[in-house]
Image (tube, grey):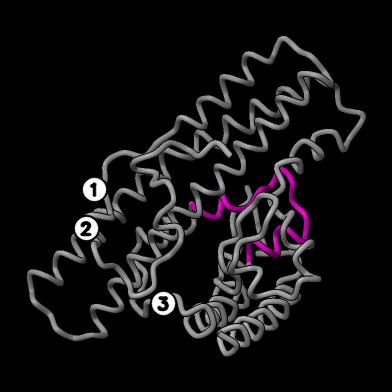
């Protein structure tokens, strides 16, 4: 147990260094697209894979990413970062998650056990509120010059923009899911015995499922932020746009993916070390979680 704790502390030291290096997070260009960066595209992911594999004991695949797997990760980035509440610390945490320097962080009042183990207690209050649902509402009110009707319009537009991105994400997620089921089936049919091939395949399925679940978790945080903002604006600035805001929120949280087989039946044993997110709502089974 002590050795495990020391490994996690060592990983935390690496994570803190990496977060300092990432500074303002992943660089972006026009329309919020990620700009190519050797540091963010090569060095940090390499460090993150080492941290994930040897510190957190997570599966790491050495297989090349398929075109669909690359697109899945690119589309995921639009959900896991929150441009409407962007700041250097939140961007750095998200970049830490994307590169696997950090585990996927959980929002809420209490940090996840992984974070408690990795970081000294003094650092936990800094990390825990990273996905506080109140941030979006605070951002809306940060400019007192904006009319209250504009605030309501912003909520409706932001929720609608998130909802519009879900179908294309689900399309590529379904393709990746179907390919993963075929990948595992090919291992069984061909009776390939190389342990490295099995481990790499199952690790890649794990990584893909982690990415999909990460997006669904992030959408749950966004939905919670919109719900908090709507509920508070009803009191602070009543408007006849309430119906439109509630409709935009409902459309988001009832979104669901279609067109792919269940992964749990296709992967009965899975990687040796399961992700906690494999037990989270599956986008192909459940709508966006309402946190």
- Does label 1 or label 2 sit earlier along the sequence? 1
Which quadrant holds the C terminus? top right
For label 3, the SS is loop
| Magenta stretch holds residue 79 | yes
Which quadrant holds the N terminus? bottom right
Q: Nearer the viewer, mark 3 or mark 2?
A: 2
Taking depth in this image into account, of 125 and 246 the one nearest to the observer is 125
Q: Residue furthest front?
A: 1
User: Do callouts 1 and 2 mark residues in contact (Cβ within 8 Å)?
Assistant: yes
- Is 139 above or below relative to 30? above
Q: Residue furthest top?
A: 240
Residue at mark 1 to residue at mark 2: CA–CA distance: 8 Å
Q: Which mark is residue 266?
A: 2
For label 1, the SS is loop
Residue at mark 3 to residue at mark 2: CA–CA distance: 19 Å
Magenta segment range?
76-95
| Magenta stretch holds residue 121 | no
- Provide residue 247's location: percent of width, then percent of height: 56, 19
- Does label 3 or label 1 sit earlier along the sequence? 3
Residue displayed at 47% across by 79% down = 57
Q: Which mark is residue 261?
A: 1
């Amino acid at each position: 147990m002590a050795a495990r704790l020391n490994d996690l502390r060592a990983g935390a030291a690496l994570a803190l260094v990496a977060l300092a290096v990432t500074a303002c997070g992943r660089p972006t260009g026009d329309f919020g697209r990620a700009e190519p960066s050797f540091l963010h595209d090569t060095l940090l992911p390499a460090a993150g894979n080492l941290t994930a594999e040897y510190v957190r004991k997570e599966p790491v695949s050495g297989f090349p990413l398929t075109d669909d797997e690359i697109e899945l990760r690119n589309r995921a980035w639009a959900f896991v970062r929150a441009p409407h509440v962007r700041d250097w610390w939140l961007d750095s945490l998200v970049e830490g998650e994307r590169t696997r320097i950090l585990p996927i962080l959980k929002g809420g009042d209490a940090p996840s056990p992984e974070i408690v183990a990795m970081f000294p207690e003094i650092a936990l209050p800094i990390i825990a509120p990273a996905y506080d649902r109140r941030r979006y509402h605070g951002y809306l009110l940060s400019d007192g010059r904006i009319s209250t009707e504009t605030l309501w319009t912003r909520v409706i537009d932001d929720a609608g923009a998130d909802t519009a991105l879900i179908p294309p994400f689900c399309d590529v997620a379904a393709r990746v899911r179907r390919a993963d089921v075929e990948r595992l089936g090919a291992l069984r049919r061909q009776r390939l015995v190389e342990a490295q091939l099995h481990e790499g395949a199952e690790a890649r399925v794990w990584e893909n499922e982690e990415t999909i679940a990460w997006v669904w978790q992030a959408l749950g945080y966004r939905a919670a932020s919109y719900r908090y903002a709507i509920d508070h604006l009803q009191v602070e600035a009543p408007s006849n746009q309430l119906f439109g805001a509630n409709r935009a929120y409902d459309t988001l949280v009832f979104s669901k993916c279609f067109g792919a087989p269940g992964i749990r039946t296709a992967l009965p044993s899975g990687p040796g070390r399961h992700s906690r997110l494999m037990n989270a709502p599956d986008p192909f089974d459940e709508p966006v979680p309402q946190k």
